[in-house]
Image (cartoon, rainbow, N blue to C red):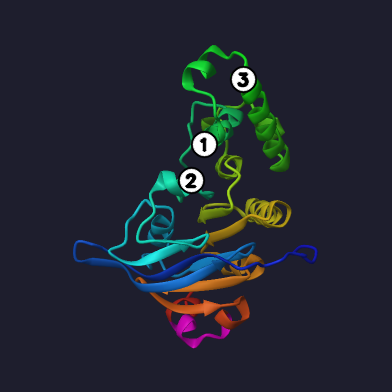
Amino acid sequence: MSAPRTRTIGDTLLTVDRISLSFGGVKALTDVSFDIAKGEVRAIIGPNGAGKSSMLNCINGFYHPQQGSITYKSVKRSQMRPHEAAAQGIARTFQNIALFKGMSTLDNIMTGRNLRMKTGILAQALHFGPARAEEIEHRLAVERIIEFLEIEHIRKTPVGRLPYGLQKRVELGRALAAEPELLLLDEPMAGMNIEEKQDMCRFILDVNDEFGTTICLIEHDMGVVMDISDRVVVLDYGKKIGDGVPDEIKRNQTVIDAYLGVSH
């Protein structure tokens, strides 16, 4: 689907070790372990309710597992807090678009720069001296993202007026504005038509290639998963039932019986 990619897959960036998560008596995740290597595209697949989004929520601190640990950049912790994850280079998009609908594309993406702003709120409000220089620097970074995602024509458009596919692209831009080392994408192509999916695939691969961003994504389109992923982990009813390169997953009988063997 694209030209041959020349990338370097590095050492382990993040390790999920025997994570278990329950909500009351409902087990969302049970003893799940896998790792994400620096520079790779790692996919998480499985039927609805398999625990995929719960796993992303554990990684970036929205959920706190009752058992297990997460090691990120060689630091082991029983739980991650969302602000810590963001500050340490983990960005996230969501199944349901979470944009500021009344704000423009540019301003929405600009919010992704907040963690990188060093001047205080008062200085920013006065727009004076260092604050002004800093804002110019951040706006230039945002403009580069807008150009990269080919959305110059909607830079001043309120995102609430945009079609679904473009809103998804703006959300990706906001995540990229934080300059993450690890980008978590929760069903980035859900609800898209074929052309929109092709565009999103291209941008995900370009982010991985050109920025060197490690990507972990949840996706139901198996054609997309098998085309763009380096490795795939499969969950079913909160348990891991498969883990490997796409060709291994295609041949895994347990995965075929639980997921690939039905219409998805």
Q: Name the quadrant of the N terminus.
A: bottom right
Neighbour tally class for label 3: few under 14, some 14-19, many 20 plus, Cα within 10 Å: few
Percent x, y of residue 189: 56, 54
Does 256 appear in magenta? yes
The mark tally for this picture is 3
Region of the chain picked out in magenta, as a range: 250-257
Pointer 2: what residue?
A: 86
- The amino acid marked with disc number 3 is Pro
Q: Residue 130, labelled with which disc? A: 3
- Residue beneath label 1, please? 115
**Labelled pair 2, 1 in contact (Cβ < 8 Å):** yes
Task: Residue type at mark 1: give it.
Answer: Leu
Which residue sits furthest left? 25
Secondary structure of the residue carrying tag 3 is helix
> Residue 70 is drawn in which quadrant?
bottom left
**Percent from the top left, x then y, of residue 161?**
55, 31
Residue 23 in magenta? no
Q: Position of residue 53 (x, y in %)?
A: 41, 59
